[in-house]
Amino acid sequence: MILERFKVPEKDQVLVSEAALRRTVTLIFERLGLTAEDAADAADALTMTDLRGVETHGVSNMLRAYVRDYRAGKLDPRPGWRIVRESPGTAVVDAERRLGIVVGPKAMRLAVDKARAVGVGVVTVYNSGHFGAIGHFAMQAAQHDMIGVCFTGSSVNVVPTFASKPMIGTNPIAIAAPARREAPMLFDAATSAIAGNKIRLAMRVGSPLLPGWVSDKDGTPITEEKPVFDRDDFYQLPLGGTREQGSHKGYGLALMAEVLSTVLAGALPTMLASGSGSKNHFAAYNIAAFTDVEQFKDTMDQMLERLRTATPAPGQERVLYPGLSEFEETQKRRAKGIPLHKEVVAWFAECTRELRIPALLG
Amino acid sequence: MILERFKVPEKDQVLVSEAALRRTVTLIFERLGLTAEDAADAADALTMTDLRGVETHGVSNMLRAYVRDYRAGKLDPRPGWRIVRESPGTAVVDAERRLGIVVGPKAMRLAVDKARAVGVGVVTVYNSGHFGAIGHFAMQAAQHDMIGVCFTGSSVNVVPTFASKPMIGTNPIAIAAPARREAPMLFDAATSAIAGNKIRLAMRVGSPLLPGWVSDKDGTPITEEKPVFDRDDFYQLPLGGTREQGSHKGYGLALMAEVLSTVLAGALPTMLASGSGSKNHFAAYNIAAFTDVEQFKDTMDQMLERLRTATPAPGQERVLYPGLSEFEETQKRRAKGIPLHKEVVAWFAECTRELRIPALLG
């Protein structure tokens, strides 16, 4: 459900097929030293994210940073798989500087296995690289007739309510739940007013930031529309924007994500240890342990259909549910191709040349 | 962290001690037919909520509704305890019209037992009465060195983003986590811009509603300050208020709460079955299954202290963390008494007279 203002302008678009993107991204990761399985997991996370239209977390914004971090030795392409503590329903994993979009699929698979055994599984992870769009991992659980939930403790960018400087991350929360006829529910959102990557995207497409999204450098919320020139001119605000509009709720939800990922992994939040990377929480709830799976899907279908077909407010086109537009976008992009910004395509050309792999096909 | 505008005006306050309130509320519930244990649990939930200063969910707003519902036969004072499905880490309970603040402590105890066995425990409940402030149940887990998390699917009051009428509840989310020197973290907030009970409270204390809190009767967000005369003049909005301010996140979080409580209990959301009562999700995470409990508390202390002592933004007094002002309020009210509105005290007088129990002591 990305705002119109954030889309790549049509004149700058180059359409690329899912298969071509997946192939090239897999090859890039393999060249960087990842195993074939890890490279395929990472390429799947990025490609699915772009297919869903979540451009803030797809190849355009993230891949070049990942490539840079592997080359700089900040990420380990072939770490082990170290489980530091485990119980029938839980595990804690030291990611040993493995990229988050590679750790995520492994961690959620473990959570799903535990949920199959005892009804619910929770895996926390620390010491990893960036996690991309965590809704992707929640969706893994949904594909196994489970509910998937993820929380992330990310780097410090957001000013707590009443504070003067950033102390918490944009700490996203995601949930995915399966339906039958309807698109699966897929919610994935930063607990900040706006995702960090959206600011980068706004700069690239030349869009202003709206009231309540960011604060001055002294922590005072900015309440008028503002063009963006420099990422360092402002700080991000929690969802709600100001106290009276509920920023204490966005702030509280960010701390909830921090406690359930970082602190529950035995790690330190970034406010106490800068450069300590992402921490994550992966939960799988085995629907069959709670209720009849077919009844669950019936109820999801009825609820989601009721929302999708609700009468919209005056001036609105229709009512969406979380995951619906991403599902529709996936179908559209599978048919027509993924629109990448021409600058991103130019980066691919340079990257594939340097790594001596076949160029990305248009 | 209640807004100043919602506090009971000093001229209307009557101070009542914790012990007196607890005793009278327990006696009321016993007279209504509850067992001594259930009455004590219910009185504890209400008294602790009032001690924390969460007046929206304490005796003032809720007790008279509970008494009315027992007398009308909408609530069952002595139902059984029917577990409809169970696994090592999970259970689903049919509350059989038991009051939510009685079900909650029982359900969280079960979740804590399961978390002790397999690391994490999740109990979903359907067919119950009102749940009060769900943070109270999350705190139960924190008292056992666990993280407590609660979600509620409540009655239909909130308009989804772009919709024209209410289809979702204010569906609150709560988390509690223990610290050592610092007050425990306790976050408990509706996923709507404003809690339903706050509107009742605003009417009682004569406060206006702020921009982005409510919509017109056609679903259009109201973006100016508005005095409240009639609860039926408007609908509630999700946290964020408008789409551009992030209302799709509040809406998504409400659906997250609905799926994890209602649908995961095998029940129908209120949008599909009106009058179907509250549905709840109680989760306990056994910290010792994930990491060292003392290290967890150290990290919580460091993080919460860092937030509490942070430099505030210009014009702000200090930075809070979720649960801090509730903890301070509890200490203050334990020392000085709980300020009830004189109308509430008058109601107590009438109620205790009718039930033939000793009057509430001042």
Image (cartoon, coloured by chain):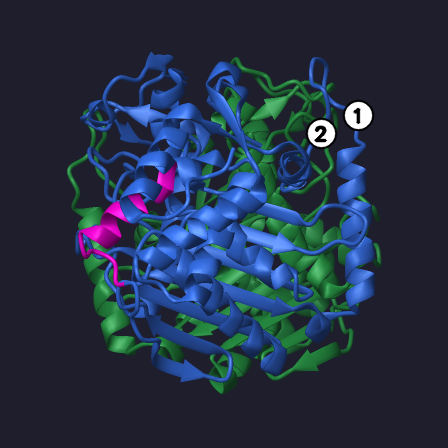
Chain colours: A green, B blue
Q: Which residues are magenta?
A: B61-76
Q: Chain of mark 1?
A: B
Q: Within the image, what quadrant is residue A78 found in? A: bottom right
Are the residues flagged by discs 1 and 2 in contact, CB closer than 8 Å? Answer: yes
Same chain letter for marks 1 and 2: yes
Q: Residue at x 66, y 51 (%)?
A: A258
Q: Is residue B328 visible?
A: yes
Quadrant occupied by the N terminus of chain B: top right
Q: Is residue B70 magenta?
A: yes
Q: Within the image, what quadrant is residue A11 found in? A: top left
Who comes first in sequence, dot 1 or dot 2?
1
Determine the secondary structure under disc 1: loop
Give the vertical position of A90 relative to B127 (above or below).
below
Q: Amino acid at mark 1?
A: Thr
Please indicate whether residue B138 sits to the left or right of residue A271 in the image: left
Please indicate whether residue A98 sits to the left or right of residue B24 in the image: right
Residue bearing mark 2:
B319
Prevailing secondary structure of the magenta residues:
helix
Q: Using a 10 Å C-alpha cutoff, classify the residue at mark 2 as few (fewer than 14 neighbours), some (14 to 19) or many (20 or more).
A: some
Q: Is residue A108 magenta?
A: no
Residue B298 pos. (x, y %): 83, 56
Q: Is residue A81 visible?
A: no
The numbered disc on residue B147 is none
Residue bearing mark 1:
B311
Q: Chain of mark 2?
A: B
